[in-house]
Amino acid sequence: MTLKHQGPKKRFMFRITLHAFTVIVLTLLTQIGGLAWIVALFFRWRLLAFTLIYVTLSALTVWIAPQFGRVAVSCLDDGPLQVQGWMYCALNRTYVTPEMAQVLQDTANEMNNRFPGTTTLLLDGNFPFVTGFPLLPHRSHDDGKKADLAFYYRDGKGGYLPGQTRSPIGYFAFEDGPTQCEPTWPSLRWDLNGLQPLWRSYALDVERTRLAVQTLARDPRVDKIFVEPHLVDHLQLSHPKIRFQGCRAARHDDHIHFQL
């Protein structure tokens, strides 16, 4: 029996459930998307209304979030520090504390000073509001004090590739290397072997990536840096702030995670 042949009460409950599910998903993905959907329910052209309301709320959030201790890393800046892609901006995932924003800018400036023309790419930061609100699928990006930076890459001829990443979103393009982690469940350590052949065949820029980690490690504001052990060896890194995140957390041989 189709939904239209069921009673009005069942159809009403189905719509309520569907909208509740939509609100939950949009909230988990963007933090403010659920609110935008609730407001859009009062309009006839719901999808258009949602889009306009969401864009408006996102723009207002840039101005409101600083009152709650978060600032947005600019999605329009073309300087040494840039956001990796529009998705992070559209989903409101580029918010950090003012101190973290300064650390990011200082790191990018240092990279550009040492290697002129270098672009440092921010991947995930945090959502704009509420300490403890999860930024899925991360386990810890919930207080504005964590950020992920993309690796730096070279082309087949050894030339630096400014603003480029192997995967479209900067994550999940893992560097080959040994691991002592055994397959286990539940776990966020995804190997995603089927995706690896799809990514661009860029080579890791060892000098720039090493310098980025060293710059963060020397910064007294930085508390921890997560990098896979085999990359620590490959990059010839050694510092007490550089740690292994554990076998149940996401791999960190596709990006640099650090926190204050």
Image (cartoon, grey):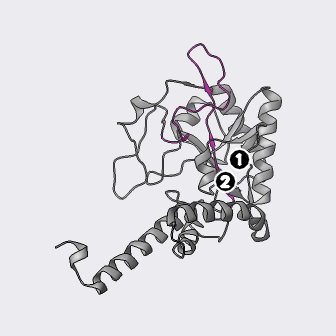
Q: Please name the residue shown 46% across and 30% down the image.
A: 199
- Estimate the x, y position of residue 19 in percent, counting from the top left: 43, 73
**Magenta region, residue range:** 144-172
Question: In the figure, 194 relative to 247: above or below?
Answer: above
Q: Quadrant of the N terminus?
A: bottom left
Q: Which residue is denoted by mark 2 in the rendering?
A: 94
Q: Secondary structure at mark 2?
A: loop
- Residue neighbourhood size for the residue with mark 1, other residues' Cα within 10 Å, grouped as few (<14), some (14–19), many (≥20): some
Q: CA distance from mark 1 to mark 2?
A: 8 Å
Q: Which residue is denoted by mark 1 in the rendering?
A: 75
Which quadrant of the figure has residue 5? bottom left
Instruction: Report if the CB atoms under discs 1 and 2 are less than 8 Å apart.
Output: yes
Q: Which amino acid does the dot numbered 1 rest on?
A: Cys
Single out the residue that lies furthest toward the left.
1
Disc number lying in front (1 or 2): 1
Nearer the observer, 33 or 238: 33
Nearer the observer, 206 or 129: 129
Single out the residue that lies furthest toward the top.
157
From where the camera sits, is residue 242 visible? yes
